[in-house]
Amino acid sequence: MTLTFNSELYSQLLSQHQPRIIKTEEENEKFLETVEALLSRSDLTPEEDALLELLVKLIEDFEDKHYQLNVSTPRSRLLHLMEARSLEQADLVETLGSNEIVAKVINGELKITKEQAEALGKFFHVDASLFI
């Protein structure tokens, strides 16, 4: 049995989800939710599969432009790990030494020292070189 592509149904999906070039984090999140909803289903129609493919491409393009790993810095990696674990600055005081040091590191006013990198590596259970 060959599945046929229903252009009218696809047009309805496009109208419902309104895919477009992603320009904001909010738009990216909205499309990510749609992709997750589609991926959670086991039997997509050809039209839903085409929508999924389009949304994934739009998300990839946005994230390639805005989340380039090769331009990350020790500070940006620290911020990412903090966000991923829902940590506040206060959670790092014991690891880095004081509120003032944590604030300066977070704000980019102070570079992470080798000793701090090792402490952060232990704290986050990652290689200390991420912070150097």
Image (tube, rainbow, N blue to C red):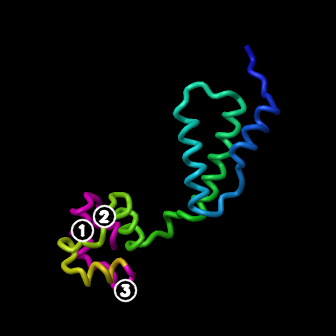
Specify the amino acid type for callout 3: Glu
Percent position of residue 22, x then y: 66, 58
Give the extent of the magenta segment: 107-132
Q: Kindly report the distance in space between the C-alpha atoms of the residues bearing marks 1 and 3.
A: 19 Å
**Label 1, on which residue?**
91
The residue most toward the top is 1
- At which x and y percent is residue 123? 22, 63
| Front tag of 1 and 3 | 1
- In the rendered view, tell whether residue 69 sits above or below residue 110: above
Specify the quadrant of the image occupied by residue 65.
bottom right
Number of residues whose C-alpha sits closer than 10 Å to that of mark 1, classed few (under 14), some (14–19) or many (20 or more): few
Q: Is residue 48 magenta?
A: no
Residue at the right extreme? 8
Q: Which secondary structure lies at badge 2?
A: loop
Q: Which mark is residue 109?
A: 3
**Quadrant of the frame with the N terminus:** top right
Q: Residue at x 64, y 40 (%)?
A: 52
Residue 71 location, x and y as percent? Answer: 50, 70
- Horizontal side, residue 35 vs residue 76: left or right: right
Q: Are marks 1 and 3 in contact (CB under 8 Å)?
A: no
Q: From the top left corner, tell me how far across and down residue 24 is, in percent.
A: 61, 63
Going from N to C along the chain, the mark reached first, 1 or 3, is 1
Dot 3 falls on a residue whose secondary structure is loop
Q: Mark 2 vs mark 3: which is more N-terminal? A: 2
Q: Is residue 114 left or right of residue 84?
A: left
Residue beneath the point at 38% across and 62% down: 83
Which residue, given by chain and number where applicable, does mark 2 sit on?
87
